[in-house]
Amino acid sequence: MESLNGFVVFVQVAELRSFVAVGRALGISASAVGKSIARLEEKLGVRLFHRSTRSITLTAEGALFLTRSRRILAEIEAAQQELSLASELPRGRLRVSLPLVSSLVLRVLGEFMKTYPEIELDLDFTDRMVDVIEEGFDAVVRTGELTDSRLAARKLGKYRSLLVASPAYLSQHGKPSVPHDLLQHRCLHYRFAHSGKLEPWCFNLPPDETELQLPVSMVCNNIETRVCFALQGLGVANLPDFSIRELLATGQLQSVLDDYVTREGTFYILWPASKHPSPKVRVLIDFLCARMFTPSFQN
């Protein structure tokens, strides 16, 4: 602690340029301030200040040491604040924006509520690109890379898209063996809310082949409808693997064209950038990162 006190005294002298003023601020004598600086200089083997009867100025070595000292003291202060926050009980309203992927998040959020009963969840499910800061969200879950420098982010997990249909549908219409076969099939599509465009079905095609203009038998803006209609044998749907894992395992749906489907994505949790997120935000981040993509919480 003596060494730490030396850092504190040194930074104060560098800023106030007066042993008397520093002594008054720290509640010690000017003589004690001078002795502290002398001990620090002796330990470092360099002169930190040019002293005269009229002024105190930093040497070149002192200026370099000031930058490092401020950084050290800032890190110590940050650690103290972090420990202080960690001791607080997470509580209060927590406003979270989530994509329309209830099969991925609902069970996890249910467990979160049981674990942290003092937190009031305010959930907004939308595929609209919300402005986290302006709209007052504590956190959002989204796919894609972080583009807003005002936000911090942690990766939750990855998923891949699969083309699926029911065994009854494939028995009646045949199983496509190449992407072009889909031109003769009923295709169940998703429309992006923010752009109004249909979600593309991404295939690994030769460079000279153009993008397929797939038939449209149905369009909706959620996962559940496409899963439901695929189960009823109404067509082929392009769905994230986490939404149909159990249905594939039980044979209620079958995947097709696995070697051709290339789309993958990553989910992130984003929150307003801060060195010290509040306890309620911090526990949400840790909880989702630890559980959201574990098999026991999917389907």
Image: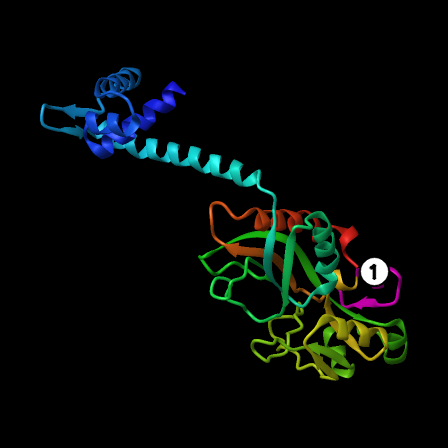
Which residue: 48% across, 62% down? 133
Q: Is residue 51 magenta?
A: no
Q: Is residue 54 visible?
A: yes
Whether residue 177 is visible to the viewer of this picture, yes or no, is no
Pointer 1: residues within 10 angstroms few (<14), some, or many (20+)? some
User: Is 246 in the magenta?
Assistant: yes
Q: Nearer the viewer, residue 291 or 192?
A: 291
Question: What's drawn in magenta, residue-wise?
Answer: 245-259
Residue drawn at 47 percent across, 34 percent down: 80
Q: Quadrant of the N terminus?
A: top left
Q: Could you tell me the amino acid type at mark 1?
A: Glu
Residue drawn 63% across the image and 78% down it: 198
Q: Is residue 139 above or below residue 28?
A: below
Residue under numbered circle 1: 246
Return the residue nearer the eye: 117 or 202. Answer: 117
Q: How many marks?
A: 1
- Along the viewing direction, whichever of 176 and 35 lies nearer the viewer: 35
Camera-nearest residue between 125 and 254:
125
Q: Position of residue 261 (x, y in %)?
A: 70, 66
